[in-house]
Image (spheres, grey):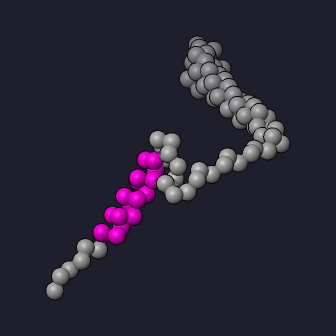
Amino acid sequence: MERTNGTEPWQRSLQAVLSALNRSLHGAGPCPGQPPAAPVPRDPRRDANAYMYILFVMTLFAATVGSLILGYTRSRRVDKRSDPYHVYIKNRVSMI
């Protein structure tokens, strides 16, 4: 009884997909027997607000980064009046 390789059809289909991908990357048509498809014309109204979206995303990014930088610099101040250590020292010095 001869056993058949179960992965052979899978390997053939994978090889066909890879060779089609390789042909499409090098500029050949998808299949040798078919003519290349004509490019689909783009609708100019579809991309009309693309710049607004990019501007909106960049503004959100700038606001996020700005708030992080501002929060970090404000938290790193050396002389805070609400620092418990400074309050303790101030109270102890005034008692002496």
Q: Nearer the viewer, residue 24 or 61?
A: 24
Which corner quadrant of the image does residue 64 belong to? top right
Residue 77 x, y percent position in the rendering: 61, 18
Q: Tell me the residue at 45%/53% (across/down).
A: 20
Residue 24 x, y percent position in the rendering: 49, 47
Q: Per the image, is 13 magenta?
A: yes
Residue found at the very far left of the displayed protein: 1
- Above or below — where is 80 with respect to 10? above
- Above or below — where is 56 with respect to 36? above
Q: Tell me the residue at 45%/47% (across/down).
A: 23
- Above or below — where is 84 with respect to 49? above
Q: Is residue 95 visible?
A: no
Residue 55 x, y percent position in the rendering: 75, 31
Residue 25 x, y percent position in the rendering: 48, 43
Indicate left or right for 82 with 16 as reference.
Answer: right
Indicate left or right for 48 with 25 as reference.
Answer: right
Q: Nearer the viewer, residue 30 or 44?
A: 30
Q: Tell me the residue at 78%/40% (across/down).
A: 47
From the image, give the main secondary structure of the stretch colored magenta.
helix
Residue found at the very far bottom of the displayed protein: 1
Q: Tell me the residue at 51%/58% (across/down).
A: 33
Q: Per the image, is 94 magenta?
A: no
Q: How many marks?
A: 0
> From which residue to which does the magenta span run?
7-23
Q: Is residue 32 visible?
A: yes
Q: Nearer the viewer, residue 86 or 41?
A: 41
Identify the image quadrant of the N terminus. Answer: bottom left
Which corner quadrant of the image does residue 79 belong to? top right
Q: Nearer the viewer, residue 92 or 76?
A: 76
Identify the image quadrant of the C terminus. Answer: top right
